[in-house]
Structures are given as C-alpha cells and as structure tokens.
C-alpha cells in the first residue's frame, strides 16, 4: 500500500500513530468533562442525561461514545430502590372520584397537581415530608416538613403552592384517600380556591404514580443510604435538593432533558410569540 501511495513505511506509521494519539487525547479530554458532569450531578446521571448535559455545554459527541467512556471510567447512575408505604384510608371523611384516571399529561402549568406525603429516617425519628407536584413540569410547587404526620403538614404544603402559583379556574388536585387529604379543613381550603378534587382508588399507588416516582428519586438521590443525624440536618439536605438541584439542574427525560424551571421558561417563551401573533392579526 505504501508503494501505491508513494510514501515511505516510516511516514505511513508516523501518520497513523499521530491519528491514534489525537483520538486518545480527545477521548481523555471528553472523559474528564463526562466525569465532571457526573459528579456535579451527584452521580445520578446515566449516559443519556450526561450526553444531554454535554450538549447543553456546547460539546458535540455521540451518546454511544459517552456510554463507552463512562463504562471505561466505571461511572453509572445509581440504581433506585423501591420502598413500600401505606396510607390511612380508614376514616369517615367523604371521598372524591378519580378524575385523572392516570392521565398525567398537562399542556400548561396549574392544570393538574399531585399531592402526597412520605417520611425520611433520621436518628431523632421520622421526618415527614408533604409535597405537591405540577404535572406539567414536574416542579414541586409546594412542600413542607414536620416531625408530625397530620393535616397541618399537608395544609402547609398546599398554602405554599397556592401562594407561589396563584392558580386559575380548572385546576385538578389529586391525592390518595389518606385522612390528611380527606379531612374537612383541607377540603375546605381546596373548595375556597375553586379547585377540583380527585382521589386515587383505595390501595392503588399507580393512580398517583408521578409524585410516587418523585419520592423514590428524592430518597435515592438526596438520602441514599444515609441516616441523617437530626431532623434539621435532613431538612437542610432536602431543601437544597429540591430548590437547588431538582428544580434548577436535574434533567428530565420526559421534559426534553430540561430541568423543571427551564422547561417552564421554554413554555413561556413559546407562548409570547403566539400571543403577539394573535394581537397582530387583530390589528
């Protein structure tokens, strides 16, 4: 082949080695960027999210290449563990029908909210966490924490959501049949704001799957195998996870690999031109 190309054997091998060295150097640089992105996102991202992260940074590379380099570096997303939880539905409060029927799609913010509560282990005892998730962006629009598992806990999360979002007519609030959500004081607060009430079927966690999925994600990514030394320590970690990481940094495959905040901003930017177009057509 060297004779056909009219080059020396030394020249050919020097050219080939230079090409290999260049590729190795590029892979080394890319692997460093991959490792940085992996650790900056708490070791929770697999190759798809790392690829999206690099793309957002302006780095062009194939996902398979990212996956291969992650495998060489032994970087992989931590596996999520499912934990069962129970709901106290043995009460005499009125129940609402299931309006969602597992349809968690939403075309805009404040169309569908999912509410639920969970618990976090600490060395001082359980820390209870109530949350309300907007189906449109997966953003936790309201949340509260307490050492007590009661109606005041879930009402505090609802008040935060109402204050932050100020929803209009047509919002559906979906929860399980737990006594906290079915209580008279909680239902009164919903009715005062003209919010439609929807509840899961008895014992069916899949009817509220979106926020159940969030709890699993939070417990795996924020808590992991850690048992917090105190409730205050857990509160600080959860606050930082929700408000700093989950809302503003964590990329969701269902949100075009955007964070909840960025997804809502994107929706607002799309809405402005359409409103302007309607206004121009009326002139």
Image (cartoon, helix red, strand yellow):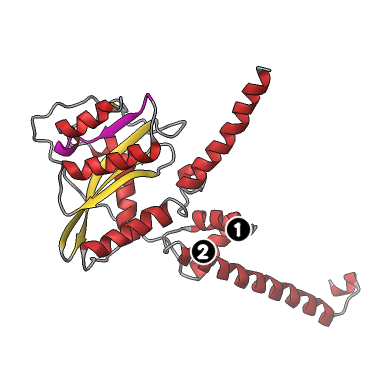
Label 2 sits on a secondary structure element that is helix
Q: Which residue is rendered at x = 65% and y = 25% of the image?
A: 277
Tell me residue 94's x, y (percent).
14, 26
Task: Tell me if residue 198 can be seen.
Answer: no
Q: Earlier in the sequence, mark 1 or mark 2?
A: 2
What distance separates the C-alpha of mark 1 from that of mark 2? 10 Å
The residue that label 2 is drawn on is 37
Vertical placement of residue 51 versus 161, above or below: below
Dot 2, how many residues are within 10 Å of its Cα: few (below 14), some (14-19), or many (20+)? some
Q: Is residue 84 rendered to the left or right of residue 22? A: left
Tell me residue 230's x, y (percent).
21, 66
Q: Which residue is rendered at x = 13% and y = 36% of the image?
A: 89
Q: Which residue is rendered at x = 23% and y = 49% of the image?
A: 118
Tell me residue 53's x, y (percent).
54, 56
Which of these two is toward me, 41 or 262? 262
Q: Is residue 100 rendered to the left or right of residue 59? A: left
Task: Answer whether labels 1 and 2 touch (C-beta < 8 Å).
Answer: yes
Name which quarter of the figure residue 20 lies in. bottom right
Q: Residue furthest right?
A: 6
Label 1 sits on a secondary structure element that is loop
Please state the extent of the stretch shown in magenta in the rendering: 169-180
Which of these two is toward me, 263 or 184? 184
Q: The N terminus is located in which quarter?
A: bottom right
The residue that label 1 is drawn on is 57
Name which quarter of the figure residue 283 lies in. top right
Is residue 178 highlighted in magenta?
Answer: yes
Vertical placement of residue 82 versus 23, above or below: above
Which of these two is toward me, 265 or 27? 265
Vertical placement of residue 68 versus 214, above or below: below
């Amino acid at each position: 082949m060297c004779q056909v190309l009219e080059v020396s054997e030394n020249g050919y091998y020097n050219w080939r080695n230079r090409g290999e060295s260049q590729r190795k150097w590029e892979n080394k640089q890319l692997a460093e960027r991959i490792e940085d992105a992996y650790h900056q996102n708490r070791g929770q991202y697999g190759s798809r999210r790392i690829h999206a992260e690099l793309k957002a940074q302006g780095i062009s590379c194939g996902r398979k290449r990212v996956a291969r380099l992650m495998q060489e570096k032994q970087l992989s997303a931590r596996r999520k563990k499912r934990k069962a939880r129970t709901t106290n539905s043995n009460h005499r409060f009125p129940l609402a029908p299931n309006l969602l029927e597992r349809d968690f799609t939403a075309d805009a913010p404040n169309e569908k909210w999912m509410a639920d509560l969970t618990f976090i282990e600490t060395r001082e005892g359980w820390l209870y966490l109530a949350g309300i998730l907007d189906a449109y962006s997966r953003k936790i629009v309201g949340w509260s924490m307490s050492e007590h598992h009661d109606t005041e806990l879930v009402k505090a999360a609802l008040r935060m959501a109402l204050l932050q979002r100020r929803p209009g007519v047509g919002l559906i609030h979906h929860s399980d049949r737990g006594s906290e959500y079915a209580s008279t004081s909680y239902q009164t607060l919903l009715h005062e704001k003209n919010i439609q009430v929807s509840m899961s079927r008895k014992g069916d966690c899949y009817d509220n799957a979106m926020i159940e999925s969030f709890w699993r994600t939070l417990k795996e990514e924020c808590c992991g195998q850690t048992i917090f030394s105190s409730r205050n320590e857990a509160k600080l970690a959860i606050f930082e996870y929700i408000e700093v990481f989950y809302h503003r940094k964590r990329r969701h495959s269902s949100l075009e690999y955007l964070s909840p905040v960025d997804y809502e901003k994107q929706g607002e930017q799309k809405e402005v031109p359409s409103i302007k177009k309607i206004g121009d057509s009326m002139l």
